[in-house]
Image (tube, rainbow, N blue to C red):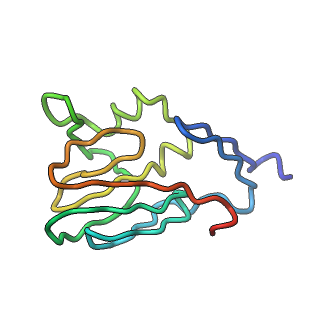
Amino acid sequence: GNRDTDTVERSLREIRFTRGSILPALGAEHAFVIPGEVRAPEYGICLQAESAATIPATLRPWRPGDRVTLRYSRGPRKVAEVLDRLHIVGTARKNWPVVESDGKIVWMRGAEVEAPGLRFTAQLLIESDL
């Protein structure tokens, strides 16, 4: 392989080895409707969302300044701080996926987000699914 661009990333649930030629595209945004499903190979997930009401949403990488309210916490905190607590660094951090709906972060990989009435299920996509 090309040693300059090969990467190995480890998150809470997966270890991913990426060949230099297929590094994830940064910044991809997927608009979708809840209830519904969005496939996002660049994040390695297929995300199913359930809700009684129909609401528009966007799966995207987090941005500096994003805030999220975690379940069991007193108020919103910066996504950057949550990523620090999860020890997420490097390319994985830049491209960490969140779902935004109505100006609020309602889902974030690896965290339990306070989002009344919404349920998310993420399935990991493996190379053969892509």
Image mark count: 0
Q: Is residue 95 above or below residue 32?
A: above
- Give the residue displayed 26% in from the left and 66% down from the top: 57
> Residue 21 vs residue 114: left or right?
right
Residue 106 relative to residue 82: left or right:
left
Q: Residue at x 35, y 38 (%)?
A: 111
x and y percentages locating residue 2 in the rendered image: 83, 52
Task: Find residue 82 and report its image quarter.
Answer: top left
Q: Is residue 119 above or below residue 114?
A: below
Above or below — where is 88 with respect to 43?
A: above
Please provide percent x and percent y for residue 61: 40, 55
Q: Is residue 8 toward the left or the right of residue 36 in the image?
A: right
- In depth, the one of 63 and 114 nearer the eye is 114
| Quadrant occupied by the C terminus | bottom right
- Residue ranking furthest to the right: 1
Q: Residue at x 17, y 58 (%)?
A: 103
Residue 53 spot, x, y in % from top left = 14, 68
Quarter-of-image position of residue 71: top left
User: Residue 76, how many percent across, how many down?
Assistant: 17, 36
In depth, the one of 119 and 66 nearer the eye is 119
